Image (spheres, coloured by chain):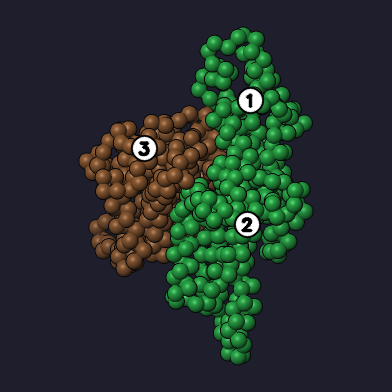
Amino acid sequence: MRIYLLKRVLYSLLVMWGVATLVFFMLRAIPGDPVTVILGEEATPEAVEQLRHNLGLDGPFYVQYTRWFARLLRGDLGRSILAGEQVTVLLIQAAPRTFSIAALALIISLMLAIPAGIISAAKKHTFPDHLATVVAFLGLSMPNFWLGIVLILFFSVHLRWFPSMGYVPLDDGVWPWLRHLILPAFTTGTAFAAIIARMTRSTMLEVLNETYISTARSKGLLERVVVLKHALRNALIPVITVIGIAFSLLLVGTVVVEDVFAIQGLGRTLVRSIINRDFPVVQGAILLVSGIFVGMNLLIDILYTYINPKIRFE
Amino acid sequence: MITTSSRSAAEAVPVAVSVSTSEWRRTVRYLRKDVKVIMGCIMLGLLVLTALLAPVLAPYDPNAQEFDLLLPPSWQHVLGTDEFGRDLLSRLMAGARVSLIVGFAAVGLAVLASVPLGLISGYYGGWVDTIIMRYIDLQWAFPSLIIAVGLMAILGPGLGNVIIAVSLAYIDDFARIARGEVLALREEEFIVAARAAGGSDARLILRHLLPNSLAPLIVQATVSVSYAILAESTLSFLGLGVAITTPTWGLILSGARGFFTMAWWLAIFPGLAIMVTVLSINFLGDGLRDALDVKISRAE
């Protein structure tokens, strides 16, 4: 098992190296000279030279490549062209906002989806099941930015329950923090909740057909006990697999939601810097998000070896 | 299929194909009874018709700024007018074209590029497989939307670029599924028999492996159309999509952002258009998944 884990860690590092290389090439794949693209044709030679150096685009190719990695390993992602600040500083400011939204989205969606899935399966082909199915389909088909807009119009503008934009750090108190996050988190989590509800329903239905469920029922156990104790435990295993990759997916889901709610998280930082052609920030944000993705996958694999003995003893 | 003794052994093998033909027939029968599939087909059919006939059906020129600003829905303007005095219904009809073109073209392109990759990777194995799969693993490390957003940063706005960016973002899904199917089928008896009968690699891949891998690919392709349409509207909404002059659902929504409190119709109808389109495809995809009995593990 040690060897397996070591292999997985090494492999993830290899993937990260590939990711960093692709991001390195990204700047060089822009048609034309990125420096001219950013500064325009009329820039002074000094400004051009300065930016070329800042972007690491001066010198021969292999020098650029080694320098890119040398900087990267020191945690230096360059400076933002627009703000002049270190990219790492910008990303460290943005990350907690995105993480807060994704974490809250995960909690909200699980709290809604798993009970909905259980009820759907236990009361198959009745009104609650049909209702849950329709809601899940709508949740899957709604663009999340539109859901955000509708929620703002109803809950912020009409009812005035929640603020329509912005972020308050957790240090300013839990309630202000939560008030700003509820709508964005709900928006981000909807599609995921729909997937989990459908999955819980189908795995529950499968498990409820198993013979040990019939045994439990024939022992005279209450249906509630059969469903919640015997069936649910086994039905949740595949659901947990999906929850594993969920956090990364939710993280990506925040990209457009942050734009709707004007929260300067990683997603909004990425999008704004693409529009402003602030390439060092674009590169840094893509690296960070992909790094989290790779890291989460590794973490899930490691957790799995503990949960699933089949892999452990291979 | 009845195989006569006069046929050569290599031709006698496609029994597997004929089995799958009757399977398809059963699938179609199954699909015809599925309410979701029927609803999905009707909705999507109407949308495709609207998109095709938009220039004829649209009551006004979608770009003509010739009416009062922010008129609420009325008989003259069924869905009202926008912040520049353009007819919203006409603009949504024009937007249907962009959404459906991007949805189908991006998935078509992704299938054409990635299914051969997956088939070859699974069939030949060895270093071919290693190289292709290392690339696919690398792409797997990037979330699809981030790939699309990053590519739009490189390519710049435009309809063709959106199609390319969205299709590239989904290549890894199809390649993985095709490869997995080939790996599962490779040792099946009918494949071994076909190979023993002297079938060439190309024949084995195209006549035997591809037809028998189609079910999960079809389901994935259908679902991917809905992802692609959502991705296009997301890119447009973020200002990273087609040119600003082209009316798309995402752009209409983002353009009207400052006016939602004054004009609810600008907030509601473009989103409804996206939702109905995606919903129709999800209905179809779900029906196909049931009918073909496919399980797709990756949830997105």
The chain whose colour is green is A
Same chain, marks 2 and 1? yes
Q: Nearer the viewer, mark 1 or mark 3?
A: 3
Q: Residue B69 carries which label?
A: 3
Local SS, label 1: loop
Q: Which amino acid does label 3 sit on?
A: Leu
- Per the model, the C-alpha gap separating discs 2 and 3 is 41 Å
Local packing at callout 3 (Cα closer than 10 Å; few below 14, some 14-19, many 20+) is: some
Report the residue at 26% width, 38% height from top: B60
Judge left or right: residue B126 versus residue B107: right
Asked whether disc 1 touches disc 3, contact meaning CB atoms under 8 Å apart, the reply is no
Q: Can residue B107 be seen in this view?
A: no
Horizontal and vertical percent for residue A269? 62, 36
Local packing at callout 2 (Cα closer than 10 Å; few below 14, some 14-19, many 20+) is: many
From this viewpoint, which residue is outermost toward the top? A45
Horizontal and vertical percent for residue B146? 56, 40
Looking at the rendered image, the quarter that the C terminus of chain A falls into is: bottom right
Q: Name the residue under label 1.
A: A82
Colour that chain B carries in the picture:
brown
Q: Name the residue under label 2.
A: A106
Report the residue at 50% width, 38% height from top: B238
Local SS, label 3: loop
Q: Residue B120 carries which label?
A: none
Chain name for mark 1:
A
